[in-house]
Amino acid sequence: MKRTIYNEDHEAFRATIRDFIAKEVTPYFADWEEVGYPPRELFRKLADLGLTGFGIPEEFGGAGDVSFKYQAIIAEESALSAVAMYNYGISQGVVLPYLLNLANDEQRARWFPGIAAGDLLLCIAMTEPGTGSDLAGIRTTATLSEDGTHYVLNGSKTFISGARNSELCVVAARTSPATAEDRRAGLSLLVVPTNSAGFAFGRKLDKIGHLASDTNELTFTDVRVPVENLLGQEGAGFSYLGQNLPRERLSMGVEAVSRATAAIEFALAYTKERTVFGKPVASFQNTKFVLAECKTEVAAAQAMVDKGLELEDTDELTAADAARIKLFCTEVAGRVIDKCLQLHGGYGYIREYPIARLYADTRVNRIYGGTSEVLKTIIAKDMAV
C-alpha cells in the first residue's frame, strides 16, 4: 500500500541515512556485536549530521523542534539493513524527551550542548530485580541530606540498556515512601552521572539478541546526587514515566514493522535464488501463500504505525493508542519473521544470514517497554472493561 506520511524532505533525509548506515554501520556491525556496544566515535559522527539534537533548541546546538518521523526513518533504514544503533535510539528516542519536557533552564544550559554534540549519551534506569512492569514497586531510595544539598542514592537496577556508553543516567527512585492510598506516590527522577562515586556496573547481561547493545545490572551505594539534578518535581516521577511511554511504545511499533518488512524482503530474495527439486523455492505455492500472508499482515501494521506517527506529530497520541500499536505490531512482527526464517530452511538459523539476527532481536519487543500482557490491561481499561 502506498504510504503518504513522508514528503520530499523526509525522503532526502532517508537517502542521507541510508548512505550513512552503508558506510558507518553495516561494515562494522559484526564487530560491535562481539564487543557488545558501538564505539563512542559513532555518536560524534551522528552529531556531525545533526542527529543527536532532535528537539534541542538551536541555541544549544540542536536541531530545534523536529518531527518524530525523522527518527522513524532512521529505524526503518536500519532494519532494512538488518542493523541497529540501539544506544542511539535509547539516548535520543527514549531518554532525551524526559529532559526536553522536564529540565529547567539551568539544566538545559548544562546538559543540552553536550548531548547535541554527541559528547553526552543518556540511559534510563527503571527496572529492578523484583520490579518489571510494576514501576510502583521501585525500592531504590534517594534520601535528601540534612543540609538539603544532595540526595543519597541506594539500590539496584537491572535490564538497563546502553549504560556503559552513557555519561548520564535518569534514575527512578523513591524520595519518600508510598502511601496506603497511592503506591505510585513518592517516586522521583534524578539525573546521575555514570562516573559518580558509588555508581557501579554489575553484570553485562548475556542476551539472545540485541548483541550490539549492552544491557546491564547497576548498583548505587551512597551515591551523592546534587539537588540540582532532580528532574521535574519531587514525587512526580511516576506520572512523568507515564507521559513519555506513548512515544517509546510507538517507536517500538515502528521498529517491529520495519523489521518485519525487511524480513519479507530477505525471504523473497532468498527463495528466488534457492532451488529445491530443481525449482526456485519461490515457485512453490506454499511459499507464495506464506509471503502473501506476511505482506498483508505487515501492510495492516504499517497503516497502524503511520497513523500513530501522524498523531504523535499533533500531540494526539494517547497511552491506549500507543499500547494498541505496540501490541499489534510486535505480535505481527513475531509471526512474520518466524515464517520468513522458516522459508530460509536451515540457513535461517545461521547468524551470517540477516533473518537470524532479525529473529533474535525482535523477540524482546513483546517484553520491554511494557509486556503484551500489560498492554492488554491498558487497552481494556481504555474500553472501560
Image (cartoon, rainbow, N blue to C red):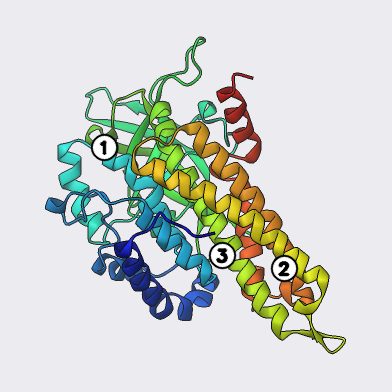
**Viewer-nearest of discs 1 and 2:** 2
User: In the displayed image of the protein, which residue is found farthest to the top?
Assistant: 181
Would you place residue 82 above or below residue 132 in this image?
below
Dot label at residue 211: 3
**Badge 2 element:** helix
**Viewer-nearest of discs 3 and 1:** 3
**Viewer-nearest of discs 3 and 2:** 2
Compare residues 66 and 360 and report the one nearer the observer: 66
- Name which residue lies at 37% across and 46% down: 95
**Residue type beneath disc 2:** Leu
- Name which residue lies at 44% across and 49% down: 200
Mark 3 or 2, nearer chain start: 3
Compare residues 59 and 70 and report the one nearer the observer: 70
Mark 1 or 2, nearer chain start: 1
Classify residue 287 by image quadrant. Answer: bottom right
**Residue type beneath disc 1:** Asn
Compare residues 244 and 200 and report the one nearer the observer: 244
**Residue type beneath disc 3:** Leu
- Name which residue lies at 22% across and 35% down: 228
**What is the spatial separation of the Cα atoms under label 3 and label 2, in whole angstroms?**
19 Å
Can residue 208 be spotted in the picture? no
Tell me whether circle 3 and circle 2 mark residues in contact (CB < 8 Å). no
Residue 321 placement, left or right of 71? right
Tell me whether circle 3 and circle 1 mark residues in contact (CB < 8 Å). no
Mark 3 or 1, nearer chain start: 3
